[in-house]
Amino acid sequence: MAGRLFTVVGPSGAGKDTVLDAALVRCPQLLRIRRVITRPSDAGGESIDGVSAAEFQTKLEQGHFALWWDAHNTRYGIPAAMDRALAEGRDVVFNGSRAAMPEILRKYPQVTVLSLVVTPDVLRERLILRGRETPEDIDARLQRANLPFQTAARTIEIDNSGPLDHAVEQMVAGFTPSADTV
């Protein structure tokens, strides 16, 4: 029996990792796959495996990734361990990317997308507080955040503009199999 696959997407600063971390406390059966990213591991935000561009390329050439993509001058990889876990029947979740959805959907047509959205004012405040981007970078991210997100995948939209508990409840519900899918 194959496991279920979930990806969490949304604009940078939408709170993907915060909501996911809290939801996984309530859903310990889910396996979170940690991303490999070409930035320092201590850059803030999610817990990642930070590597150099050369290390990433070597891992890519050696087949270490189930998925990979480029975004914002950074490379992202999802380790091949994800495929093994799915084959073993484990339910798996990873922090994805809206831009990578065509490739994710091509390889994993049964993926469920948990799409986090926030109001522009909340997103701006979070990006400023995070302190990783220049004001120009923040403006660019806000413009991209307002682009419509469309995918053929089953998508659950989660509004994370308000209390964290509200978004966590929505994510936990998304992870919970409904009677018609069991």
Image (cartoon, rainbow, N blue to C red):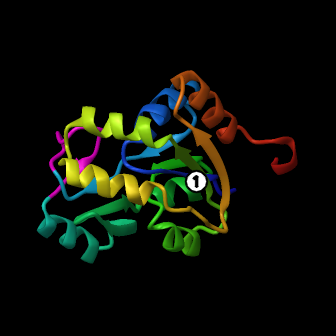
The location of residue 45, given as percent across then percent down, is 29, 38
| Magenta stretch, main secondary structure class | loop
Q: Which residue is mark 1?
A: 88
User: Is residue 166 in sight in this rendering?
Assistant: yes
Quadrant position of residue 108: bottom right
Q: Is residue 140 magenta?
A: no
Observer able to see residue 81: no
Residue 76, quarter of picture: bottom left
Q: Residue at x 20, y 59 (%)?
A: 38
Name the residue: 28% across, 49% down. 138
Q: Position of residue 68 (x, y in %)?
A: 36, 68
- In this rendering, is residue 167 above or below 40? above
As drawn, the residue found furthest toward the right would be 180
Report the magenta residues as a range.
40-51
Q: Position of residue 116 (x, y in %)?
A: 53, 45
Q: Mark 1, residues whose alpha carbon is within 10 Å: few (<14), some, or many (≥20)?
A: few
Quadrant including the N terminus: bottom right
How far across and down, in percent of the image, does residue 55 sit? Answer: 15, 65
SS for dot 1: loop
Query: Three-letter amino acid code at disc 1?
Result: Glu
Is 65 on the left or on the right of 182, as rendered? left
Name the residue rendered at 52%, 33% in the picture. 161
Residue 35 position (above or below residue 56) = above
Observer-nearest of 59 and 108: 108
> What is the number of callouts on the image?
1
